Image: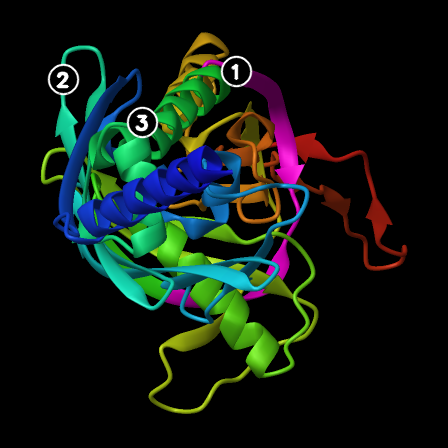
Amino acid sequence: MKILKYIFLLLLLCGIAGFVFIATQPGEYTITKSKEISASKDVVFNYVKDFNNWNLWNSNIDSTSSKELFSEDSKIYTISNGNESIIYETLKLYDSDSIAQKLTQDNLTHNLVWKFTSTKEGTLLTCEMKGTMTLKQKVFSVLQGGAQNYLGDDIQKSLKNIDKYLTSQLNKFNIKIFGLVTKEGTLFIKQIDSSSIKNFSSISRIKIPELIKFAKENSINYTEAPFVLFDHWNTTNNNTKFSICLPVKEEIITSEGSDVLGGELFEYRAVKVTLTGDHSHIRKAWEEGFKYIERNKLSIDLNGSYVEAYKVSSPNEKEPSKWITDIYIPIKVAAAPKIKPVFTNSVNEPITETAPTLTE
């Protein structure tokens, strides 16, 4: 019995010593993990900044039990697992170069910085995490050889998931040319904006949800998916002017000073091209449309309506390979020949219409 008591006492002393050792370990940590991804910097940046995508790669999310909540401005993202919650908040975006975020868990705040660097193969994505560990985290950290292993493994796993998902999704796309079609007219509401060509994609991603939100808040029934109406696209000066549009059932008259206006798109002839896949391939789809026009000796209507319609897109569809974007390039339609009727007149006879002749 004495031996058992000594063993128990020894184990107790070891436990106390271990507890004291762990408790006195520094709680602050800094972890940096990187992964090169075969996608452009803009694509990776837009993918990571959108909290709607996080359930596809974040290692902290259990798809079977986690519940997700999003703030109205999409800047705060909460993951709940039973009584535990992890809250992510985007503090600032730095023009496709970095994202500053705050992570709150167990009443402790951690700082997250995502960095995006262009490489020959694509983008080097770096995640830097700083903060203070709880006692529970200290225990696991010591058992697993330090914070770099304990917390760093989850970050590295998330980076690998981003690479795997983006690589597989971006390589799946299809461009189909439907040829000359009649683009139906529609009433719509719009917000006019302009930007550099480089920033158009990121700005439109922000503006489209804002316009949809405006429609819902004002009980405006929209009938189809949103589209962009381009006023000009100047590659020389690297700028574009465009309208973010939402088709509606009835004519909308907004109050004076509102940045949301009503408009109408009239029916016209256009070459239709459909891209199935991520928006990073949209320029190629436009180019295929222009090539089709050239091959078939059609004439572009320079004053017509150039449309990019987002038939299926985020956030309704999570997988970029399933997004559907319709492009309409306006085409000049040859004017119908003028018909000049020839009449025979006589004082005593009624006016008689003869067969018409064509004039040049």
How far apart are the two marked residues, 1 and 2, measured between alpha carbons?
22 Å
Image height of 112 relative to 243, above or below: above
Residue sitting at 26 percent across and 36 percent down? 142
Q: Earlier in the sequence, mark 2 or mark 3?
A: 2
- Seen from this angle, which residue lies furthest bottom? 256
Q: Name the residue type under label 1.
A: Lys
Q: Which residue is mark 2?
A: 119
Q: Which mark is residue 143?
A: none
Query: Which segment did they paint magenta?
Result: 171-191
Q: Earlier in the sequence, mark 1 or mark 2?
A: 2
Question: Mark 1 against mark 3, which lies toward the viewer?
Answer: 3
Residue 217: within the magenta?
no
Q: Position of residue 272 (x, y in %)?
A: 57, 29
Label 2 Cα neighbours within 10 Å, binned few <14 / some 14-19 / many ≥20? some
Q: Which residue is mark 3?
A: 156
Q: Name the residue type under label 3.
A: Gln
Q: Position of residue 199 (x, y in %)?
A: 23, 45
Does residue 196 appear in this view?
A: yes
Label 1 Cα neighbours within 10 Å, binned few <14 / some 14-19 / many ≥20? few
Nearer to me, 85 or 137 = 137
How far apart are the two marked residues, 1 and 3, measured between alpha carbons?
25 Å
Nearer to me, 123 or 20 = 20
Q: Name the residue type under label 2.
A: Thr
Nearer to me, 264 or 112 = 112
Q: Which residue is mark 1?
A: 172
Classify residue 313 by image quadrant: top right
Question: Mark 1 against mark 2, which lies toward the viewer?
Answer: 2
> Circle 3 — which element?
helix
